[in-house]
Image (spheres, rainbow, N blue to C red):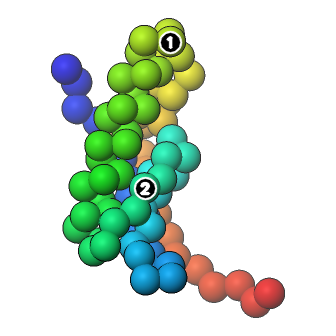
Amino acid sequence: MKKFSLTATIWSEEGVYVSKCPELSVASCGDTPEEALSNLKEAVELYLDNARVLGLITDVKTALTSPHKFTSAFEVAA
């Protein structure tokens, strides 16, 4: 099985930590940042397993294999 490097964003929301993989739009949560990340990894693995079964893995291939990934934080007024 091939390994992929993906991005995780984690934030606190109403007493729980929310985690999201922006490349795949998969999210999870946990009581701690570490648990949120662990749960996100499991959710992404399940998502990819399901995509393989359904023959949809090629739809996310670019997000999985792109060697150029950038993250940034910014502020907006709303």
Q: Residue at x 43, y 55 (%)?
A: 28
Task: Out of 13 and 48, give the one closest to the viewer.
Answer: 13
Identified by mark 2, the residue type is Ser
Q: Residue at x 36, y 32 (%)?
A: 46
Identified by mark 1, the residue type is Leu
Task: Out of 15 and 67, give the one closest to the viewer.
Answer: 15
Query: Which image quadrant: the C terminus?
Result: bottom right
Establish if 28 lies above or below 50: below
Q: Disc number at residue 78?
A: none
| Res 64 quadrant in image | top left
Q: Residue at x 46, y 21 (%)?
A: 51
Circle 1: element type: loop
Task: Out of 41 and 73, give the one closest to the viewer.
Answer: 41
Few, some or many residues within 10 Å of mark 2 (<14, 14–19, 20+): many
Query: Which image quadrant: the N terminus?
Result: top left
- Point out residue 60 in the picture as x, y percentages from the top left corner: 51, 28
Q: Which residue is mark 2?
A: 28
Q: Which residue is mark 1?
A: 54
Q: Residue at x 43, y 32 (%)?
A: 47
Circle 2: element type: strand
- Point out residue 33 in the picture as x, y percentages from the top left corner: 29, 72
Label 1 – label 2 distance at C-alpha:
22 Å
Q: Does the image show residue 69?
A: yes
- Point out residue 52 in the picture as x, y percentages from the top left corner: 41, 15
